[in-house]
Image: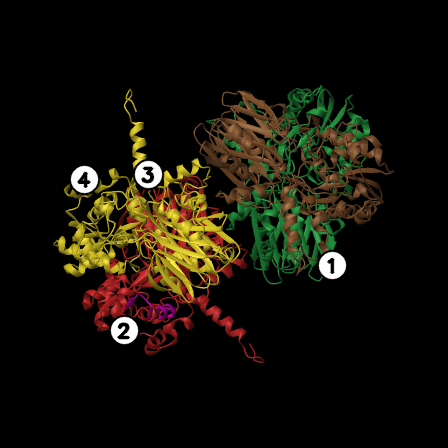
Chain colours: A red, B yellow, C brown, D green
C-alpha cells in the first residue's frame, strides 16, 4: 500500500511519514457516517488501515479494515453496522507490529467500569517498559500497539472515576499522544502536556467534533472552534455538556513544526496559522536566504507547490509545472528490460520536456530525507535538457529520528545525518543546494526566530533537541550494547 | 469507478470524456510488460477496463479486467500469461454496451487467415448500419462494440492479403479511428483519413512502439519519432521492417482540438505542439480577451492549472492555490444528515479559506459542460469569503455533442446548448464569466485563427461543424420520429 | 474443482465423467429461479461451470460462473438479473477448451431472425470439420465449444423458419446431442436420432419443463411426463402449445447404457427404468455370475452402494459399511512427510477397521477405469486387517473411449485397454476379480440380453461398437500419421 | 455455513451439534501440515472456523479463518506461514460470540512466562462468574470465548511452573474441557475429571499426536495408542519425553454417550468401542424393543445408516436406500413460486419413489431434536407412495439441554421437552414411533444397563441428570427472575 499523497517519493522511503489521524463526534445521529467522512479527509495522515467504533447508548460496535476509508466505509451497510450518536475513528500508517488487524484502532476493551474505546495519534516513548511491568503482573496483551498500554493502565487504576483513571494512566506515559476516548458516559479528548501531536475541536449543529486537522471539519461541514490545548482534557457528555481541565499544570508547549512543513494539508489551520501561508512564507524566506539566477521555478509535485509559489513571488522568476505527476499510481509494475530502466520514476513523475529544455531551473521540494529521490529528480531534469538545476529545500536538514509518532529512517540513512552540505549537493548532483535555516523556518511561521532556551516547537528532527526522555530507546541501546560485549569481558 | 484525474467534476458528469487509449509494441522481449506500463501512462484516457493481447510467434494470449491497469497488470503472474515479442493493449471508459467484459478490447478473432487482434480508439458513426447488414448475412456478433464490425468486415473481405482486407474494411467506415492491429505477420497502425483521434510512433531500442500520446513513450523509456499521419497505414514486421502507405489519398486533416484543451496530458506533444504550452497560451489569450481587476488567479484543480499560470503571467495577478484537492477519492460516501450537506463537493475540493477570504478572485477552468460543478465551485469560493468571483474558461462554449469517441451529454444538457452567455453567468452565479473565443483558441495553438472554409481541427463540439456524415445518428432520429407519429397518420 | 459426488475416485481420474446436465422451463413466473434449482439437482453431471439464460418477452439475459450452481445462483440478486417466464441452463464438466468462461453455456447469439440461445449435452463428432468450413467462409468463432458450430449453421441456413433452420443445421451433425433451444417464440428440445444422451419432459402447473434427468423434476416439484424420444423435436410456445415432430425418420435408438451404471442419480428414471433398481439388479446378477465365500459385502462409497445391496440380498452375505467416506473434500492438501504417506487416499475414504479386521470381504464398485484407485482401496482393506479381498465390478471392463460427451482417458490408460482379466486382478492385488458380463448387464436392465446385430443401447465403451462415424477422430489420426512420416519418405 | 455432514437436518436446526474438534502434534517436521490434515478429518465436529498455531523453537505463529480446513489450510503458502515441529489446531461450530474471528481458537497470549496457546473442546459452566471476577481485578478480555478465562487464570496464577499454573487454573473450572496447550517447553493435553469430552493420543514415527477422535490418526497415518483418561494430564517435551499425572484424584468418569449416538465418526473408536458397532448394535436393540411388520428398512441419510443396517440384520427386513441424498448442498436457494413448494426439503433429500411406492417402511434416524425434519421426511415418504411409515429412533427422547459444549435448542423447542410419545407420533404423522430405551442404549454400548446410582456416561440430554453444577445457568436464571419482578415489589 502506497502513500498516495506523495507516491513517488514514498516508494523510495524518502519522506517522513505521519502515522495517524483521528476523528470523533458525539451528539449526532448516524455518527459513524460523519466519522467516516472526517477520516476520509484525514486519509493523507495514514493509508494502511482504518477503524471506527460507535456507541448506540447500550453497546459499542467496531469495524476495521486494511486500506483506505473509501474502501472500507463508503457503503451504507458498513456504516449501518455502526449505529449510534457517538463514534470515533482512526487512520494509520503501519507500525512495527506490521499490518496486523489487531493493531488497527480504535482499540476497545470491556472494563469493569464498562466499555472503553480509544483512538491514539502519537507514540509513547516508554511503552515497552510499562508493558513489561504489566505483563509481569498477569496482564495479557493482544496487540503490539503502544496504545494498548494505556488501556491496561486504565483497567488497573484504582481511582474511582473514569476521568481520574485516565489521568492516572497518562501520568505514567512519556512521549506524544492526542487521544479520543469513548465510554458509555461520553467522549474525552486530550493532548499530551507538550501538545506534540495536533487535535482540534469543532461544532456540527449541536454535536461536538474532534479531529487531527481542521480540514476534516471543512469536509463534514463543521465549524472549527479551537485547538485542544497542550495538556488539556475535554469531556463531552450526551447532552452536550463540555468540561475542560488541565491536570498536568502549565508546561511550555512544543507542537511539531513538521506539521507546517509537510504533514498537515495546506488548507488546514495548525497552531493558529494557515499551513498554506506558512509554506508560501517558507518559500519567500528561502528566496531571500538562497537566491539564484534562473529562468523557471519548478515545484516537486505536489508538496513543493506552495513553497515554489512563494519562491516565485519573492524572486520574480516564473512558476511553471516542469514536472507532471500521474494521478494513477499504486502498486509497483513488473519492470521490463533495459529500455525502460527509468520507468519506476517516470511512471509517477514525468519531466515536461517542452518547458524545461534549455532552461536554468530552481527545483523546490519540502524536505530531503534519504536524498535518493532528489537525485532522481535532478537527473530527470537534466535528461529533459535543463541547463542548470538549483535545488532549494523548504525545511532545514533532517538529521535526527522522531520518536513521537512519525516514521523516520534511522540516522545513518538520513542524508543530513551522513554528510555536510557540500557532500549533499554532490550526492544529488545539483548545481547548487540550499536549505532554509532553522531561524528562517521559525520566521516563516510568524515568530522572530527560534528561542533556543525554550523552543516554541518540537523540531528534534532538525536539531536533535528532544523535549522528553526516551526511555525505550535507552533500554534498547543498553540491550544492543550487551549483545556487542567483547568476548571475555565481564558483563 | 471514478475518473480519478478529475474526480470532482466527473462525478457530476461535468467533463467531456475521452473514451480510450491504445498502446502497441513489436520487437521487444516481454512486450506485454512494456505494454502494461505504456497503458498505465494512458490511464487518464480510460479507467473502466483494460486489456492486453500478446503474440509469442505461435499463439495469441489475452487478459482483460475491469478497473485500472495497475489493478490488473502489475503482477508478474499477470504479465507471464502474456508471452511474446508483440503486444497491444487498450484502456477504455465505458460505452453504451455497459461494463461488459466482452466489450473490453483488444478484440480478437481466429480468421481463416489466422489470428487477428485489434485495439481501437474512436467511434464509427455508421457502425449500426454496417452491423445490421452483416447480421443479415449470418454474422454472429459477440459484443456490442463498434470495433467488432471492423473484424467482421475483414473476415468477409475477399481481398487476398491482410493489408488489402483491412483497407477494404476501413473504406466502408465513417467516423474516427486510430487502430493498432496484430496478425501473425506483425503489427499495423493507422488513423482515419481526417486523423480525428491521435496516434504516435516511437522507438525503444530495436522495437517499434505506438501510443495514443507521447507521454507513454516517456514512461516506457522510448523515443518519440513522429505522429502517424491522418489516413496513414504503418506496417511493422518482426524483423523491424516498416512499410507505410496512404490508401485513402490526400484529405485535409482535422485532428480533435479538445486534445489540446483537456484530453491529453500536459506533458504530451499533440499535433507537433506541447500541450502544456498550448494550455498556458490559452490562459494568456484569455487574459487579453477577458481581463478583470482581481487579487488572485485561482485554478480549478488540476486541469485548470496551466491556463491559470498563463492568465497570471499575462495579467500580473498572483497565482494561488485557492482550492485544495484531495488525493483520496473514489466511491461516493453515504451522506449523513443535514450537517454535512456540502460534503459531496467538499470531500474532493476544499476552499483554502485563509487565502481566499476577502479577496477578488479569477477562477480558471478548462471547460464548462453542464455547469453544475462550476456553480458549486463558485459557491464554495463565496462561502470561504471571496469578495468577487470572476470565472474564465479556457475553451469556447461547448454546445454540441461529439460522435467520434468522446462521451458527451446530449445537447439539451449542455449549458451552452441551453442558454446564452448572460444566462450562463447567472446560472453559475459568478460576478463575471468569459470563454476564450474560437479564434483565440486557434491562435493559442499556433495558428492565425480558424480557417472557416477549411478548418484545421475538428472543433464540432464548439461549432457544430461535423467533418463526416453521421449515418447512425440519422437512422436513430428517423426511428424516433416514427415512434412519435401522431395516431391515424399514414406512415 | 473436484467432482464431489465421487471425490476420491475422481482425484485419480478413475471414473468416466458425464460432461453436462441441462434444464429448461417455459411458462412460469421467475423461470430462472426454478431453472437454478433444477440445475442444482443435476449438479452431479457437471461441477465446473454453470450458466442460465432467460427471456422476458423482449430481451435475453445470461449469467455464468465457474463452480457450483449454489455458488452462482443461490442469491436473490443473481436470479433477479434473469427475469422472464422462460429460462434454460447448463452445468458442465470441463472440456478441451479449458475452464474458459466463453465456453460456459448456454451459448447465445443475436441472429437476423432474433435471439437464439442453446444448451447442449453431448458431443458433435464432426464439429472440427464443420468449424473449418465455416471459418473459411468468414465466420468468427468466439468459443472452442462444439456447440457454437450449431449456432453458426443455424445463422447461415437459408430456410425461412427457425424450426427448419435448426433441422437443416442438425442434419449436418454427427454424434450425440440433447439440446434445449430458446428463441423469442418459445423453447425447443430435441435429441439426436440415436438418443445417446438423455432428455426428459415434465409439467409444473401450466409450465413445461425439460431436464437431463427426472430427479430435477422431483426437486422443483414438477411431474415427470415422458422422455423426449430419440430423434424427436418438441416445440413449446408461450401459451403452452406443444408441437412434436420426428424430422430424421425412424432410427433404432441406442441410449447410453452407462447412465444406468453410473452417470444418472439412483433416484432418476432413465429409459423407463429406475436407475436404483437397475444397479441393485446388476449386483444380483453379479452375485449369480461371480459368487464367492465371504463374511461381508462392502460397497466402495457412494456409487457402489446399490449394487452392493443387490449382491448382499442375492448372496445372503451381510452388507456393512467397511469404508467410511468423508463429507469434506475438495482441494488437495499439502502432503507432509513420510508419516502421512497414505493420506491422499485416507482423507477421503477411511477403512472401518473394527468391522473389516479379520474378515473375508467382497468389495463392490460400479466400474474400473484406470485401476489406480481400486488398487489403493484393496490395499486399504488389507492394511485394516481384511483376511481376503474379492473385487466385484458392476459393469463390464471399460476398454474403449467415448466420443459422445463423456470424458474418458485414452485407451492406453484404461486398465481394460491394457490387460486381460488375470493381469487386472494382479494389478489391483485382489484375491479375486470379476466384472459383470455384457449380457448380464443387459439382463439387469430388463432385456433378454444384448442384441448383437442391433444393440439396444450404446455400449461402445465396453464393446468398441460405435453407433456413428467419428470424423474428427479420423482427421486427427491422419494428421498425427503425417507428423510421424519417416524422413525422406514422400508424403 | 452449513453442517455438510447432515445438511438437510441441520438447516432446520434439527440436530444436536458438537461444537469443536482439536488436534495437536509435537516432534514432527512441518507439524502444521499434519495438523491441518488431522483437523480436516475432524471437520464434522465444527465447520464454521478453523485455526492452527505452531511453534518453531523461538516464536509462535497463528493463522485462522472462517469456513472449512480445506478452504484455509490446503495451500502450501498457508502452511508455510506456520513453521516448526509443534502445532495444534481447532475446528469449531459457532458460539454465542458469533462468528467473530477473535473467538477462533487456538487462543494465544504472551505471558510473563512466555508464549501460551490453547485449543479447547468443551464448555466451562462457570466461565461467566470467573470472568466477572477477573475483569473486576483489571483483566482485559479480547474474546467472548470461555477459553480466554483459562488463559487469564494461568496468567495471574502465582505458582512457579507452567504445569502448576495450569492445574491451579483448572481447579477453578466447572464443566467440560479437553485441552491441548502449547508453551515453549512442549505440549500438554488434558481432560476434565469426568472426561465429558473425548481426547485420544497416538504416535506418528517419533512424534506424539493428540486428537478428539481416532479417525484423525487414521487420516494422518498415525497409530492410536490410548485415550487420555478423564482427569489425566499428559506433558510431552521436544525430545519426546512424556509425563502423566492425575492432579484431581479419582473421580468416576462420565464421558458423553452422544458421541456414540451421533457426534463421532462411525470409523472412530470412542471409550474403547467402535462407534459403528455401537450404532449397529443400537439398531439391533431397537429391532428387539420395537419390532414392526414392514417391507423395507430405510435409513435417513447418512447418520441413520449404521442403525438401519443393525435393524435390518436383526429383523430380516431388507435394507434399501429409500431416500437419496444430494452431495451438493450449501446455501439456501431462492424459492420460486408455488410449484416448487417442497423444494427446500427436496433439494437435499429425495424420495426414491420407484423403491418406496406401495411399501410399508421402517424409517431409522439417529435422534429427534425439534421434530420438524422428521415430519417432513415422513411426509416425503407418503408423497412417494409409501403405504405405512414407521419411525424408529436410535437414541432415547432428547428432552434436556447440554451445557458441556454441545449446541442444543432451549428445552421448550425440544420435541421431547414439549410432549409425550403419543403426541410426538401425532406431530410427525408416523404410523408408529419408538425410541430406544435408556437401558437399551447402555446395553448397545456393551454395558448391562444404566447404573442409576452412578451412571457410566453423561446422558443429561436424555435424563436431565447433570454431572456438575451449572453456576452460570443459575446466575442467569436469577437475573431473569429479577427482571420479571412485579412492579412495587421490593427487590
- Residue placed furthest toward the bottom: A488
Please tell me whether residue B486 is drawn above or below residue D76 in the rendered image: above
- Asked whether residue D191 is drawn in magenta, I would say no
Which numbered circle lies on residue B472? 3
- Left or right: residue D418 versus residue A88 is right
Q: Chain of mark 2?
A: A
Q: Nearer the viewer, mark 4 or mark 1?
A: 4
- Does mark 4 fall on the same chain as mark 3? yes
Tell me whether the residue at label 2 lies in contact with that at label 3, contact meaning CB atoms closer than 8 angstroms: no
For label 4, the residue is: B419
Q: CA distance from mark 3 to mark 4?
A: 27 Å
Disc on the earlier residue, 3 or 4? 4
For label 2, the residue is: A388
What is the quadrant of the N terminus of chain D in the image?
A: top right
Helix, strand or loop at label 2? It is strand
Q: Nearer the viewer, mark 2 or mark 4?
A: 4
Near mark 1 (Cα within 10 A), the count class, few <14, some 14-19 or many ≥20, is few
The magenta region covers: A363-378
- Residue placed furthest toward the right: C293
Helix, strand or loop at label 3? It is helix
Q: CA distance from mark 1 to mark 3?
A: 80 Å
Near mark 4 (Cα within 10 A), the count class, few <14, some 14-19 or many ≥20, is some
Q: Nearer the viewer, mark 2 or mark 1?
A: 2
Q: CA distance from mark 4 to mark 1?
A: 88 Å
Q: Chain of mark 1?
A: D
Q: Chain of mark 3?
A: B
- Asked whether residue A364 is drawn in magenta, I would say yes
Q: In the rendering, at what x and y percent does residue C104 appear?
A: 54, 40
Which numbered circle lies on residue D206? 1
* Count of number-bearing discs: 4
Amino acid at each position: 500500500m502506497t502513500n498516495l499523497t506523495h507516491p513517488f517519493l514514498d516508494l523510495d522511503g524518502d519522506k517522513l511519514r505521519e502515522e495517524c489521524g483521528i476523528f470523533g463526534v458525539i451528539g449526532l445521529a448516524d455518527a459513524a457516517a460523519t466519522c467516516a467522512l472526517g477520516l476520509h479527509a484525514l486519509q493523507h495522515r495514514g493509508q494502511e488501515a482504518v477503524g471506527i467504533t460507535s456507541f448506540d447508548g447500550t453497546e459499542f460496535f467496531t469495524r476495521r479494515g486494511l486500506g483506505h476509508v473509501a474502501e472500507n466505509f463508503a457503503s451504507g451497510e458498513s456504516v449501518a453496522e455502526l449505529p449510534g450518536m457517538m463514534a470515533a475513528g482512526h487512520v494509520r500508517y503501519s507500525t512495527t507490529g506490521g499490518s496486523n488487524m489487531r493493531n488497527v484502532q480504535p482499540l476497545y476493551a470491556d472494563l469493569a467500569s464498562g466499555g472503553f474505546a480509544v483512538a491514539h495519534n502519537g507514540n509513547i516513548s516508554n511503552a515497552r517498559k510499562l508493558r513489561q511491568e504489566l505483563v509481569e503482573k498477569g496482564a495479557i496483551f493482544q496487540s503490539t500497539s503502544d496504545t494498548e498500554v494505556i488501556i491496561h493502565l486504565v483497567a488497573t487504576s484504582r481511582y474511582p472515576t473514569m476521568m481520574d483513571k485516565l489521568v492516572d494512566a497518562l501520568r505514567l506515559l512519556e512521549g506524544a499522544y492526542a487521544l479520543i476516548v469513548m465510554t458509555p458516559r461520553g467522549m474525552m479528548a486530550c493532548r499530551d502536556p507538550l501538545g506534540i501531536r495536533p487535535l482540534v475541536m469543532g461544532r456540527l449543529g449541536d454535536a461536538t467534533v474532534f479531529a487531527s486537522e481542521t480540514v476534516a471539519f471543512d469536509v463534514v461541514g463543521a465549524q472549527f472552534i479551537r485547538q485542544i490545548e497542550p495538556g488539556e482534557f475535554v469531556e463531552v457528555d450526551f447532552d452536550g455538556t463540555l468540561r475542560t481541565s488541565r491536570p498536568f499544570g502549565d508546561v511550555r508547549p512544543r507542537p511539531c513544526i513538521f506539521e507546517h512543513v509537510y504533514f498537515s494539508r495546506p488548507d488546514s489551520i495548525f497552531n493558529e496559522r494557515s499551513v498554506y501561508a506558512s509554506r508560501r512564507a517558507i518559500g519567500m524566506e528561502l528566496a531571500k536566504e538562497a537566491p539564484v539566477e534562473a529562468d523557471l521555478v519548478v515545484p516537486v509535485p505536489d508538496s513543493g507547490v506552495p513553497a515554489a509559489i512563494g519562491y516565485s513571488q519573492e524572486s520574480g522568476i516564473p512558476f511553471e509545472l516542469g514536472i507532471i505527476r500521474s494521478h494513477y499510481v499504486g502498486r509497483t509494475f513488473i519492470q521490463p528490460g533495459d529500455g525502460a530502466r527509468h520507468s519506476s520514476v517516470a511512471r509517477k513523475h514525468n519531466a515536461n520536456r517542452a518547458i524545461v529544455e534549455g532552461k536554468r531551473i530552481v527545483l523546490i521540494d519540502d524536505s530531503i530525507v534519504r536524498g535518493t529521490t532528489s537525485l532522481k529528480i535532478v537527473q530527470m531534469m537534466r535528461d529533459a535538457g535543463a541547463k542548470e538545476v538549483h535545488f532549494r529545500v523548504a525545511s532545514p536538514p533532517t538529521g535526527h529520528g522522531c520518536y513521537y509518532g512519525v516514521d523516520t529512517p534511522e540516522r545513518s540513512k538520513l542524508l543530513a545525518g551522513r554528510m555536510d552540505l557540500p557532500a549533499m549537493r554532490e550526492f544529488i548532483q545539483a548545481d547548487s543546494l540550499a536549505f532554509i535555516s532553522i531561524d528562517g523556518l521559525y520566521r516563516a511561521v510568524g515568530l522572530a526566530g527560534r528561542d533556543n532556551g525554550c523552543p516554541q516547537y518540537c523540531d528534534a528532527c532538525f536539531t536533535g533537541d528532544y523535549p522528553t526522555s526516551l526511555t525505550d530507546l535507552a533500554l534498547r541501546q543498553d540491550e544492543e550494547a550487551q549483545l556487542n560485549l567483547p568476548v571475555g569481558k565481564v558483563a
